Structures are given as C-alpha cells and as structure tokens.
Image: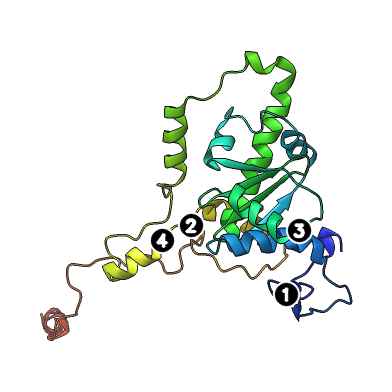
Amino acid sequence: MLYHEITASSLVKIDMQGNIVEPGTTNFAVNVSSFMLHSAIHAARPDIKCIIHVHTPSVLAVSSLKSGLLPLCQEAIVIGEVSHHPYLGGIFEPEERDKIGRNLGPVNKVLFLQNHGAVCCGETVEEAFYNVYNTVLACETQIKLMPIGIENLVLVSDEARKHVYEAARRAPDSLPKHTESSDVAPATLKKERQWRIGGVEFEALMRMLDNSGFRTGYIYRHPLVKGDPPRPRNDVEVPPAVSSLGYLLEEEEMYRTG
C-alpha cells in the first residue's frame, strides 16, 4: 500500500515472529523479511515501542559516507549519539539479529544502516517521529555542505553538544501551566505536566491535520485552547446569609411617604 492509502483500520497486528494476530481490513499480507529488522530491535531493546525505517535520498547518502552523520547542526545533536550497522540486505540469521542489537547499543535511538538509510526509534510514537524529523533535516544539511569539503566544515564542540542535547531533553517553558486559582491537587498537577520528547511538535502537526478536516482522533496531552475558563477569585466566595434587600425597600417607602 502507498502511504496515502493507509488507514487505522488497514493496519495489521503481528507478533514478534511475523505471525498475523489481527489482519485488518485489507487482503494484503505482511512483508515478513522487512519486519525482521524491526523485530530484532524490539527483542534487543524492550524500551523501544516504535521504529521507523527511513531511506530518503539525503539519509541514504549519509548512510553511505565513511564519516557518517557529522555534528554540524542542532538537528544532528538533539537525536543523541547514533549507531552504525553494516546492513546485509534481507539476511536475518540469529547471529545477524544479535549483531543489530549490539550495534544499536543500550541507549542510542538512531541506527544508520550502511547504504540503506537509517532506523529511528522511540519509546513513544512522538519520540520516534521526533528522531526521524531531525535525522532527515540533519542529513539534508550535511549533504548541502559536503561540496565545500569536510576539511572546511566547523563541527560543534563536545561541550556545546552536551548543552544542546540536555536542553532538548528538558520540557519547554511554553508548556501550558495551571494558574494559581486552579483547584487541582499538586499530585495531579505533577502528573499532568509530564512531558514526552517530541510531544509538543507532534501535537502541532496533529492540530494541523485536525484543522484540515482529517479527524485524527488524537488525544492531546496539551490542548491548544483552555478547557475551562479561569474562575475569578472573589473576596466573598459564599453569599451572606442575611440580605440587604429589606433596607432598600424601607428606604424606598420612606421616599414615597415623604
């Protein structure tokens, strides 16, 4: 199926061996040989829940370079350290599967396959897409700079890379925060303020699709519009038990009688 043909109902659920668990609504089968790459990573890294294999021209070009991805821009830094693997095509013997897991390592989320693009992973869909997006931009930047000559390129220093990477792992200051008048318990506030890598960027793209009428059904963790308007904090929260209406009526009667 082409990318624009895929719907939620057409997705196929399979197990680690490639056996179909839920067939979806189409008559198409699963490309088991391609899934073996994904299953090898899932088996080696249980923390990874989403894997995206990308081989756009720029990513494919960088995967074919001896130098690999260079720290030339912020996009190349925020994805963290990247791994490399000498891809052997559709050969996925047990030894090759183990080698894929070892080359990826226990921490890295991006694995460049020699002459075959890159595999971008994440603990969530948002994080995996975040790594794909920045990997593609980083590769495009590097390819545009290559004609200048690698010897003429200025690489980002290790200290600067550390600061940029740590800053990308912190929740942005622009996230919605509750006002002081909120009645939400502190424990609930802490839970609601949990932030996932790539979540803000991914939700912005989901809003674009929803605003275009695609009705994605995506559940936003940080909605753009406030659900409840802020409630004003008055000096008197509860009306007094005795009303002053009686005094007003007596004063009105006094004016009538003179």
Instruction: Between residue 208 and residue 28, name the one nearer to us.
Output: 28
Q: Are marks 1 and 2 in contact (CB under 8 Å)?
A: no
User: Label 3 vs label 1: CA separation?
Assistant: 18 Å
15 with respect to 193 (left or right):
right
Residue 44 picture quarter = bottom right
Whether residue 14 can be seen here: yes
Image side of residue 21 versus residue 228, left or right: right
Are circles 4 and 3 on residues that touch, CB within 8 Å?
no
Residue 196 bears which disc, if any?
A: 2
The type of residue carrying mark 2 is Arg
**Mark 3 or mark 2: which comes first in sequence?**
3
Query: Where does label 1 land, which residue?
Result: 14
Q: Disc 1 to disc 4, how far (Cα)?
A: 31 Å
Mark 1, mark 2: which one is toward the viewer? 1
Q: Does 83 sit above or below residue 5?
A: above
Q: Which mark sits nearer the N-terminus, 3 or 1?
A: 1
- Amino acid found under the numbered disc labelled 1: Ile
The residue indicated by pointer 4 is 194
Secondary structure of the residue carrying numbered label 4: loop
Extreme residue toward the front, this view: 95
Label 3, on which residue? 92
